[in-house]
């Protein structure tokens, strides 16, 4: 599981004559955590789908270590890129440990049994996501947050060099949000993650890319990007920027005054 460089080069996506992403250029370095933020419909999920190859760009290319993914067999890219998507579902009545073990599928041929090493990978992922106690439960019996952690464990078992995560904190309680983001910050993998929560993005991401109407509006370190002016311009809300009292990380305090909801 080596590190990898990810690059979106002039990626555009058009569906039914509508441009969902326009000439998006974004680089994610080896071991870097880059966040995608933006209002609903700004193109975050569409851009991520191009990276994990659920969608082919209309124009442009996605490169992994300078190689255009469009020329790489899907099974091969699945050994390098793992995705946790908003529409990830576990509809079959599998146990948690069976679902997690599916992460080894890109590495296997036929119906080979898991090796001792692969079984240990699964145990480690269950422990990492705090779901060991759920191993024999049906995924259909789990809460949304529990399922989210199962699917994250499956992605880790894949042993990717790149993690592509679309709103991975959805359904998670505060503790598991913090644990997941702490893991992402220190895992050493190349991570491209879409987040709605700007404060979570600022806490975990080395750089933040802001999308608006399918275009890159800004990109850089959170302290440089998350200004009151940008937040008002892109998200239409008033915010004050403060430093976390212990870590110094940039955080936003939103103005909930009903008289200041005129977007300007």
Image: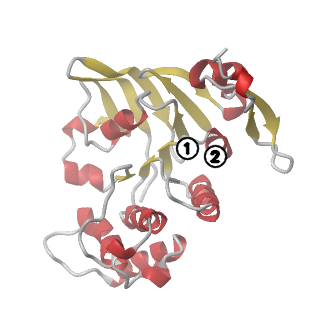
Q: 62 or 17, which is in the foreground?
A: 17
Question: In the displayed structure, does residue 97 sit left or right of residue 259?
Answer: left
Most extreme residue toward the right is 245
Q: Quadrant of the N terminus?
A: bottom left
Report the residue at 41% width, 72% height from top: 142
Closest to the camera, between mark 1 and mark 2, is 2
- Colour scheme in the image? secondary structure
Q: Kindly indicate whether the residue at mark 2 contacts the one at mark 1 (C-beta within 8 angstroms).
A: no
Question: In the displayed structure, does residue 57 sit left or right of residue 43?
Answer: left
The residue under label 1 is: 32
Mark 2 Cα-neighbour bin, 10 Å: few <14, some 14–19, many ≥20? some
The residue under label 2 is: 200
Return the x and y of residue 24 as percentages of the image width and height: 41, 23
The kind of secondary structure element at disc 2 is helix
Mark 1 Cα-neighbour bin, 10 Å: few <14, some 14–19, many ≥20? many
Q: How many marks?
A: 2
Give the spatial CA distance, label 1 vs label 2: 16 Å
Return the x and y of residue 160 as percentages of the image width and height: 39, 57
Return the x and y of residue 242 as percentages of the image width and height: 81, 36
Question: In the displayed structure, does residue 46 sit left or right of residue 173?
Answer: left
Q: 141 or 251, which is in the foreground?
A: 141
Position of residue 38 relative to residue 5, above or below, is above
Question: What label does residue 244 carry, if any?
Answer: none
The answer, for residue 227, to whether it is visible in the render is no
The answer, for residue 186, to whether it is visible in the render is yes
Mark 1 or mark 2: whose residue is earlier in sequence: 1
The kind of secondary structure element at disc 1 is loop
Position of residue 33 relative to residue 121, above or below, is above
Q: Quadrant of residue 67?
A: top left
Report the residue at 51% width, 44% height from top: 30
Q: Quadrant of the C terminus?
A: top right
């Amino acid at each position: 599981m080596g590190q990898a460089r990810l690059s979106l080069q002039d990626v555009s996506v058009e569906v039914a004559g509508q441009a969902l992403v326009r000439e998006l250029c974004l680089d994610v370095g080896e071991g870097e955590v880059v966040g995608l933020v933006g209002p609903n419909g700004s193109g975050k999920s569409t851009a991520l789908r191009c990276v994990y190859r659920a969608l082919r760009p209309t124009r442009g290319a996605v490169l992994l270590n300078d190689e255009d993914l469009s020329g790489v067999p899907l099974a091969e890219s699945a050994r390098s890129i793992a995705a946790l998507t908003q529409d990830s579902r576990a509809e079959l009545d599998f146990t948690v440990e069976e679902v997690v073990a599916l992460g080894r599928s890109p590495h296997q041929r036929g119906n080979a049994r898991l090796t001792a090493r692969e079984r240990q990978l699964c145990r480690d992922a269950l422990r990492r996501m705090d779901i060991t106690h759920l191993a024999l439960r049906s995924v259909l019996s789990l809460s949304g947050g529990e399922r989210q952690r199962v699917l994250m464990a499956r992605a880790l078992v894949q042993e990717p060099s790149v993690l592509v995560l679309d709103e991975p904190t959805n359904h998670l309680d505060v503790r598991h949000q913090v644990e997941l983001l702490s893991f992402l910050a220190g895992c050493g993998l190349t991570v491209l993650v879409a987040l709605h929560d700007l404060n979570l993005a600022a806490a975990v991401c080395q750089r933040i890319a802001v999308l608006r109407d399918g275009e890159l509006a800004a990109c850089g370190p959170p302290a440089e990007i998350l200004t009151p002016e940008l937040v008002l311009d892109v998200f239409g809300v008033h915010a004050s920027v403060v430093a976390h009292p212990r870590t110094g990380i940039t955080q936003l305090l939103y103005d909930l005054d009903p008289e200041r909801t005129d977007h300007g």
